[in-house]
Image (spheres, rainbow, N blue to C red):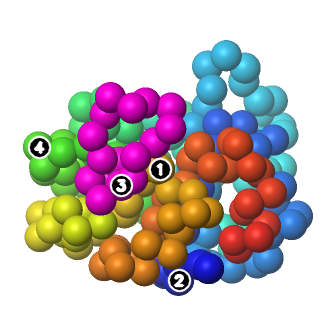
Amino acid sequence: MFAFKKKYFLIIESIKNLELKNIKKNKKLIIIYRRNNKKTENIEELKKFRQVCYIKDFKFFVANNIQLAVLLKADGLYISSHNKSFKCLFLKNLNFTIIGSAHNPREIHFKIKQGCKYILLSRLFKVDYDNNNNFLGVIKFNNFLAISKNLIPLGGINSSNLNSLNNSISEGFALMSEIKKKPAISSRLF
């Protein structure tokens, strides 16, 4: 089963987490590179990765690093829910798209003020790595769409509950931990 959406957001912490050669060319895929502080990729490798994204029509975003986004000629910037800076607003003059993440209505409103085109709202489903945190579920997520129509569900999405996303009214969905656990899933999904 599969959820058909207009946009698919993949959040990766390493370019090694994603085999681009196995993914078909499409305009629906948005890759968000969230640099892992423990190990950093070589800038030249990142430029090659970015070039492949461009050739395959994948949008490429860099998380929380304006300088790296400009250096790699990324399509935009992803700002986490912890990022409270308005420095990213000048990027709109450079034709950069801004994507943000949020966990509650207050953070959604703040991301709108920061100029985010899309807001990844977490957690849609229960996650196995943190049993203490709540999750929204599809119905509550759909209710949050009254605040902004550009919300994208994130969190707990895996191959077993992917079909449930057909009930969400969102334009797309985002995957993160499923890509880390099973890198081959991206070639099957896309």
Residue position marked by numbered label 2 in the rendering: 4
- 3D distance between C-alphas at marks 4 and 2: 29 Å
Find residue 153 and report its horizontal and vertical position in percent: 38, 60
Along the line of sight, the residue nearer the viewer: 90 or 10: 10
Dot 4: what SS? helix
Image-quadrant location for residue 75:
bottom right
Disc with the residue nearer the chain's start (3 vs 4): 4
Q: Residue at x 50, y 38 (%)?
A: 128
Q: Quadrant of the C terminus?
A: bottom right
- Nearest to viewer (mark 3 / mark 4): 3
Residue 83 x, y percent position in the rendering: 32, 31
Residue 39 position (above or below residue 111): above
Q: Which residue is mark 1?
A: 156
Residue farthest to the right, as pictured: 21
Q: Residue at x 15, y 67 (%)?
A: 143
Query: Does the CB distance between marks 3 and 1 fall below 8 Å?
Result: yes
Label 3 residue SS: loop
Q: CA distance from mark 2 to mark 1?
A: 18 Å
The secondary structure type at the circle numbered 1 is: loop
How far, Cα to Cα, is label 4 from label 1?
Answer: 22 Å
Q: Is residue 82 above or below residue 160?
A: above
**Picture coordinates of residue 109 (x, y %)?**
13, 50
Residue for point 67% across, 16% down: 38
**Which residues, given as a range, are shown in magenta?**
119-137
Callout in the foreground (4, 1): 1
Residue that badge 4 annotates = 106
Mark 4 or 2: in front is 2
Alpha carbons under labels 3 and 2: distance apart: 17 Å
